[in-house]
Image (spheres, grey):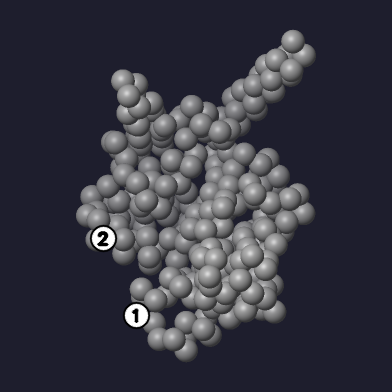
Amino acid sequence: MSDSVLVRCRDLRKIFVMGRQRVAALDGVNIEIPEGSLTVIMGPSGSGKSTLLYLLGGLDRPTSGSIEVAGEQLEKMDENTLAVYRRQKVGFIFQSFNLVASMTALENVAFPLRFSGIGGAERKERSRGLLRQVGLENRSHHRPTELSGGQQQRVAVARALVNRPAMILADEPTGNLDTTSGLGIMRLLSDLHRSGKTVLVVTHDPRMLHYATNRIFLLDGKVVTEQEYQAAITSMEELSMEGTHQ
């Protein structure tokens, strides 16, 4: 793994205005993500972890603060430059897969390449190679409805890799999967990291920590220590148990 920092966030804030309320989804976040790391961002629902991922992926803009990726500052980019950044530098994996129902697995993987000026033959060749990498070469002509949840997520992983991005961003990639399928996706992400990719996973699934080389814990939009995080989660669980027994 490289010692260089790929992502650096400084005093990152994201405020959402809901009626008369201002909600701080991120409240002064400072993080560094090493190049070639498998970074796991843990946090319960509402902690700001998905908001952080969307900001790093250029899908949203911060209210204030800075995001530097490979020496480039995202908050200074215009919409066109951000679009190029998303297409060339980032591969997204979503909880709900986001596959196109009318397309085969091969067509879903190849789809992002349509916007990269790459010819049809190379699109197919690259996509077949990635389906082979995720263990789905024999499912290349199946549509999403003909695939299990775990298989659909593997197609989504292959699609995230097709533009050869510098960074893979996964938003709760095991959230819609059963235990076994979820474990398979975790191992696949770990394999990608070991092959040299920088992988960033936001999750509330503690099993993912086993594969992490870098850990970040979020509570109420702030970075906390692992001890603070575990204490808060234990407290939440105790309160929940009290509620069920009343």
Q: Position of residue 231 (x, y in %)?
A: 64, 22
Above or below, comparing residue 96 to residue 16 in the picture: below
Q: In which image quadrant can residue 142 be found?
A: bottom right
Q: In which image quadrant can residue 83 be found?
A: bottom left
The structure residue drawn at horizontal position 70% and vertical position 79%, both measured from the top left corner, is 138
Q: 42 or 244: nearer the eye? A: 244
Label 2: which secondary element? helix
Residue under pointer 2: 81
Above or below, comparing residue 114 to residue 46 in the picture: below
Q: Amino acid under label 2?
A: Thr
**Quarter that holds the N terminus:** bottom right
**Quarter that holds the C terminus:** top right
Label 1: which secondary element? loop
Q: In which image quadrant can residue 72 be found?
A: bottom left
Q: Is residue 227 visible?
A: no
Q: Position of residue 49 (x, y in %)?
A: 49, 39
The structure residue drawn at horizontal position 75% and vertical position 49%, both measured from the top left corner, is 179
The reply, left or right, for residue 11 in relation to residue 121 is left
Residue under pointer 1: 117
Q: Position of residue 230 (x, y in %)?
A: 65, 27
Q: Among all residues in the image, which is located at the extreme bottom? A: 121
Asked if the residue under mark 1 is in contact with the one under mark 2, i.e. CB atoms within 8 Å, the reply is no
Q: Position of residue 11 (x, y in %)?
A: 34, 34
Q: Which circle's residue, 2 or 1, is located before the other in the chain?
A: 2
Q: Nearer the viewer, mark 2 or mark 1?
A: 1
Q: Amino acid under label 1?
A: Gly
Q: Is residue 100 visible?
A: yes
Above or below, comparing residue 224 to residue 55 in the picture: above
Q: Which mark is residue 186?
A: none
Q: How dense is the environment of label 2, judged by Cα within 10 Å: few (below 14), some, or many (20 and up)?
A: few
The structure residue drawn at horizontal position 42% and vertical position 47%, both measured from the top left corner, is 54
